Image (cartoon, rainbow, N blue to C red):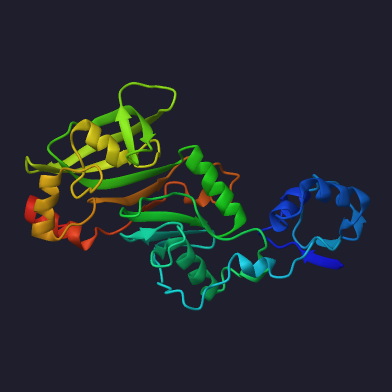
Amino acid sequence: MKQEIIIGFNEKDQRLDKFLRKVFKDVELSLIFRDIRKGNIKVNGKKSSVDYKLKENDVLRIFGYHYDLKGKNQEKYEIDKNYNYLKPKICFEDSNILVAIKDIDTLVHSNGDEEVIDLTKNVRIYLSKKGDYVPEKNLTFSPSPVNRLDRNTYGLVMFGKNNISLNELNSVIRERKVSKYYRALVEGKIKNGVYKAYIKKDHKLNKSVVSNKKDDESKEIQMEINMLDTNGVVSLVEIKLITGRSHQIRSHFKFLGNPIIGDLKYGNKELRNYFFNKYGVENQLLFAYKLVFNGIDENMSINYLNNKVIVMPFPSRFKRIMKQEFKITV
């Protein structure tokens, strides 16, 4: 059985063996190596090496019954006709990146529960409807997020729209060239400054635990806090995230004695009840509101984002609380 694959923009620059492994996950790598060496897999009609870097418009001809392309480009991205698509709220978009606003009670990635809103799936459908993403032509790529937010944290999530920008975004995040800012309402007052500690997961309680002491299971966390306003009971703070661990902000504020208002897992029950009864708050009053790009390598395709600031508007409930608790209009 002979099959043919034409390499597109989002498949280029991958090693031949790694590309084939992604497409044919059920085929052993040793068999892929053997077929490349024997010429059962050819590039542009010629034998190739396993480490050959694919180029756009390369033609792969593949011989062998164990390589079955049928359905490969549909099974991963096929849209369930019964799926309740919700057009994502877009804060910024160009040809390389998309920044969406994730709502409360929305997952960045599906957990398999069809009742829960899946932001990534909605973004892919949105881009497919626009014609910016054609699943049938992308065997190993799909637009994907490069940062995560908890299910009930509101805010900005970045997506790479093509393979190059996705890899570059992941790289600049690892190198901390994208600063992520949050705003939150917390209990009490807190001093401005950079706060460091250590975090680890308590699997029995399904919580993150923060301590000043490092052990074999813990990882260092850091955040910079700036208190913007206070009424003595609660304070509005801005947080610059320096490290990004699961539940880091929420558990760190609890450790500092300033839990985030409305937080069901780490918050103060009495204050949570007050804000629920007065404002209907059911989740943590925390949102990821700003991204600042700085220091991106000039050789990257996304270097035009240097000094770019992306800011989302305040959530309406946050505005109402700000006005009534702090007499501030935003």
Tell whether 241 sits left or right of 70: left
In which quadrant will I find the C terminus? bottom left
- Name, please, the residue furthest toward the bottom: 81
In which quadrant will I find the N terminus? bottom right
Residue 103 quadrant? bottom left
Q: Can residue 56 be seen in this view?
A: yes
Q: Which residue is drawn at 25% across and 30% down?
A: 193
Q: Is residue 328 visible?
A: no
x and y percent of residue 199 in the render? 36, 31
Q: Nearer the viewer, residue 182 or 19?
A: 19
x and y percent of residue 257 in the render? 18, 33
Q: Which of 206 and 268 is in front in this view?
A: 206
Residue 194 quadrant? top left
x and y percent of residue 101 in the render? 36, 60
Tell whether 61 sits left or right of 228: right
- Indicate whether 63 appears above or below 325: below
Residue 217 quadrant? top left
How many numbered marks are there?
0
Tell whether 46 sits left or right of 140: right
Q: Residue at x 71, y 63 (%)?
A: 8
- Name, please, the residue furthest toward the front: 204
Q: Which residue is drawn at 14% across and 46% down?
A: 269
Q: Which of 161 and 65 is in front in this view?
A: 65
Tell whether 47 sits left or right of 10: right
- Indicate whether 198 appears above or below 287: above
x and y percent of residue 172 in the render? 51, 42
